[in-house]
Image (tube, rainbow, N blue to C red):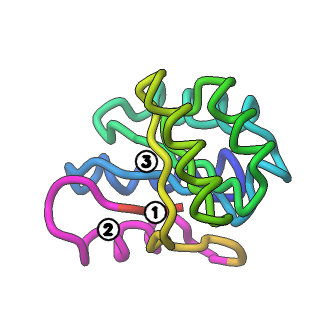
Amino acid sequence: MHSLDDARAACAAAADLGVTVRLVSAPAGAAHGGALWFRELVARAAAEWPSAAPTAVLDCSDRAGDAQGALAAGIGVILFTGPAPVAAKLADIAGRTGATVLTGPLPALDLRGVRDPVAACRDYLAKWSPGQTSAG
Protein backbone atom coordinates (compact mmCIF):
# COMPACT_ATOMS: atom_id res chain seq x y z
CA MET A 1 0.00 0.00 0.00
CA HIS A 2 1.12 3.47 -0.80
CA SER A 3 -1.51 5.55 0.99
CA LEU A 4 -4.43 5.67 3.38
CA ASP A 5 -6.74 5.22 0.40
CA ASP A 6 -5.01 1.92 -0.41
CA ALA A 7 -5.41 0.74 3.18
CA ARG A 8 -9.06 1.77 3.19
CA ALA A 9 -9.71 -0.10 -0.06
CA ALA A 10 -8.10 -3.28 1.24
CA CYS A 11 -9.98 -3.10 4.55
CA ALA A 12 -13.30 -2.34 2.87
CA ALA A 13 -12.89 -5.33 0.55
CA ALA A 14 -11.88 -7.59 3.43
CA ALA A 15 -14.89 -6.47 5.46
CA ASP A 16 -17.18 -7.13 2.47
CA LEU A 17 -15.78 -10.66 2.18
CA GLY A 18 -15.73 -11.33 5.92
CA VAL A 19 -11.98 -12.00 6.00
CA THR A 20 -9.04 -10.42 7.74
CA VAL A 21 -6.32 -8.66 5.81
CA ARG A 22 -2.58 -8.07 6.04
CA LEU A 23 -1.55 -4.63 4.80
CA VAL A 24 1.92 -4.60 3.29
CA SER A 25 3.69 -1.29 2.78
CA ALA A 26 5.19 -0.33 -0.54
CA PRO A 27 8.73 -1.58 -1.08
CA ALA A 28 11.09 0.30 1.26
CA GLY A 29 8.07 1.96 2.85
CA ALA A 30 10.03 2.64 6.02
CA ALA A 31 12.43 4.86 4.08
CA HIS A 32 9.70 6.71 2.19
CA GLY A 33 6.88 7.27 4.66
CA GLY A 34 8.45 6.32 7.95
CA ALA A 35 7.33 4.10 10.77
CA LEU A 36 5.14 6.66 12.54
CA TRP A 37 3.26 7.54 9.34
CA PHE A 38 2.72 3.85 8.64
CA ARG A 39 1.54 3.13 12.18
CA GLU A 40 -1.00 5.96 12.00
CA LEU A 41 -2.22 4.91 8.57
CA VAL A 42 -2.88 1.35 9.76
CA ALA A 43 -4.56 2.59 12.94
CA ARG A 44 -6.95 4.77 10.94
CA ALA A 45 -7.87 1.98 8.55
CA ALA A 46 -8.36 -0.44 11.47
CA ALA A 47 -10.63 2.05 13.23
CA GLU A 48 -12.79 2.43 10.12
CA TRP A 49 -13.04 -1.32 9.39
CA PRO A 50 -12.50 -3.22 12.65
CA SER A 51 -14.05 -6.39 11.19
CA ALA A 52 -11.18 -6.57 8.67
CA ALA A 53 -8.82 -6.90 11.67
CA PRO A 54 -5.91 -5.57 9.63
CA THR A 55 -2.40 -6.53 10.55
CA ALA A 56 0.43 -4.74 8.86
CA VAL A 57 3.96 -5.27 7.60
CA LEU A 58 6.34 -2.37 7.13
CA ASP A 59 8.93 -3.06 4.42
CA CYS A 60 12.31 -1.87 5.67
CA SER A 61 14.18 -3.21 2.64
CA ASP A 62 17.82 -3.85 3.54
CA ARG A 63 18.04 -0.78 5.78
CA ALA A 64 18.86 -1.95 9.31
CA GLY A 65 18.49 1.55 10.74
CA ASP A 66 14.97 1.85 9.37
CA ALA A 67 14.17 -1.58 10.77
CA GLN A 68 15.42 -0.60 14.23
CA GLY A 69 13.44 2.63 14.04
CA ALA A 70 10.30 0.74 13.07
CA LEU A 71 10.70 -1.63 15.99
CA ALA A 72 11.31 1.30 18.36
CA ALA A 73 8.14 2.97 17.02
CA GLY A 74 6.12 -0.10 17.95
CA ILE A 75 5.62 -1.62 14.51
CA GLY A 76 4.66 -5.23 15.17
CA VAL A 77 5.84 -6.82 11.93
CA ILE A 78 8.63 -5.66 9.66
CA LEU A 79 10.12 -7.04 6.48
CA PHE A 80 13.91 -6.93 6.30
CA THR A 81 15.76 -8.14 3.20
CA GLY A 82 19.32 -7.42 4.27
CA PRO A 83 22.04 -9.86 5.30
CA ALA A 84 21.01 -12.86 7.40
CA PRO A 85 23.29 -12.01 10.36
CA VAL A 86 21.71 -8.56 10.59
CA ALA A 87 18.23 -10.07 10.27
CA ALA A 88 19.04 -12.40 13.17
CA LYS A 89 20.09 -9.44 15.35
CA LEU A 90 16.92 -7.58 14.41
CA ALA A 91 14.83 -10.67 15.21
CA ASP A 92 16.46 -10.79 18.65
CA ILE A 93 15.57 -7.13 19.24
CA ALA A 94 12.04 -7.70 17.93
CA GLY A 95 11.57 -10.74 20.15
CA ARG A 96 12.06 -8.61 23.25
CA THR A 97 8.98 -6.58 22.40
CA GLY A 98 6.84 -9.27 20.79
CA ALA A 99 7.46 -7.98 17.26
CA THR A 100 8.29 -10.14 14.25
CA VAL A 101 10.91 -9.82 11.52
CA LEU A 102 10.07 -11.40 8.18
CA THR A 103 12.83 -11.93 5.64
CA GLY A 104 11.17 -13.31 2.53
CA PRO A 105 9.09 -11.72 -0.18
CA LEU A 106 5.39 -11.34 0.61
CA PRO A 107 2.61 -11.66 -1.94
CA ALA A 108 0.71 -8.41 -2.16
CA LEU A 109 -1.50 -6.51 -4.56
CA ASP A 110 -0.08 -3.19 -5.75
CA LEU A 111 -2.93 -0.69 -6.14
CA ARG A 112 -0.89 1.99 -7.89
CA GLY A 113 -2.85 3.08 -10.97
CA VAL A 114 -5.83 0.80 -10.30
CA ARG A 115 -9.14 2.46 -11.26
CA ASP A 116 -11.34 0.63 -8.75
CA PRO A 117 -9.15 -0.35 -5.81
CA VAL A 118 -11.94 -1.86 -3.72
CA ALA A 119 -12.99 -4.16 -6.57
CA ALA A 120 -9.36 -5.10 -7.26
CA CYS A 121 -8.83 -5.92 -3.59
CA ARG A 122 -12.05 -7.89 -3.44
CA ASP A 123 -10.99 -9.98 -6.47
CA TYR A 124 -7.51 -10.49 -5.04
CA LEU A 125 -8.68 -11.42 -1.55
CA ALA A 126 -11.33 -13.79 -2.87
CA LYS A 127 -8.54 -15.95 -4.35
CA TRP A 128 -7.13 -16.67 -0.88
CA SER A 129 -8.54 -19.19 1.56
CA PRO A 130 -10.66 -17.79 4.40
CA GLY A 131 -8.72 -16.15 7.19
CA GLN A 132 -5.58 -14.01 6.94
CA THR A 133 -4.92 -12.68 3.46
CA SER A 134 -2.54 -10.08 2.07
CA ALA A 135 -3.18 -6.85 0.23
CA GLY A 136 -1.48 -3.57 -0.10
Which amino acid is tagged 1?
A: Ala
85 vs 121, left or right, is right
Q: Secondary structure at mark 1?
A: strand
N-terminal of the two: label 3 or label 2?
A: 3
45 vs 59, left or right, is left
Mark 3 surroundings: few (<14), some (14-19) or many (≥20) residues within 10 A: many
Q: CA distance from mark 3 to mark 2?
A: 10 Å
Q: Is residue 131 magenta?
A: yes
Which amino acid is tagged 2?
A: Leu
Residue at 40% x, 41% y: name it.
54
Q: CA distance from mark 1 to mark 3?
A: 9 Å
Question: Label 2 near label 1: C-beta < 8 Å?
Answer: yes
The image quarter in which residue 13 lies = bottom left
Q: Is residue 130 magenta?
A: yes
Q: Which residues are magenta?
A: 114-133
Residue 108, x across and y down, in percent: 48, 70
43 vs 2, left or right, is left
Q: Could you say which is closer to the camera, residue 112 or residue 99?
A: 99
N-terminal of the two: label 1 or label 2?
A: 2
Q: CA distance from mark 1 to mark 2?
A: 7 Å
Picture disc at residue 125: 2
Residue 47, x across and y down, in percent: 47, 25
Tell me the residue that label 3 is attached to: 11
Q: Secondary structure at mark 2?
A: helix
State how many labels appear.
Answer: 3
Picture disc at residue 135: 1
Which amino acid is tagged 3?
A: Cys
Q: Is residue 54 above or below residue 85?
A: above
Q: Is residue 50 above or below residue 56?
A: above
Mark 1 surroundings: few (<14), some (14-19) or many (≥20) residues within 10 A: many
Residue at 68% x, 24% y: name it.
73
Residue 18, x across and y down, in percent: 20, 49
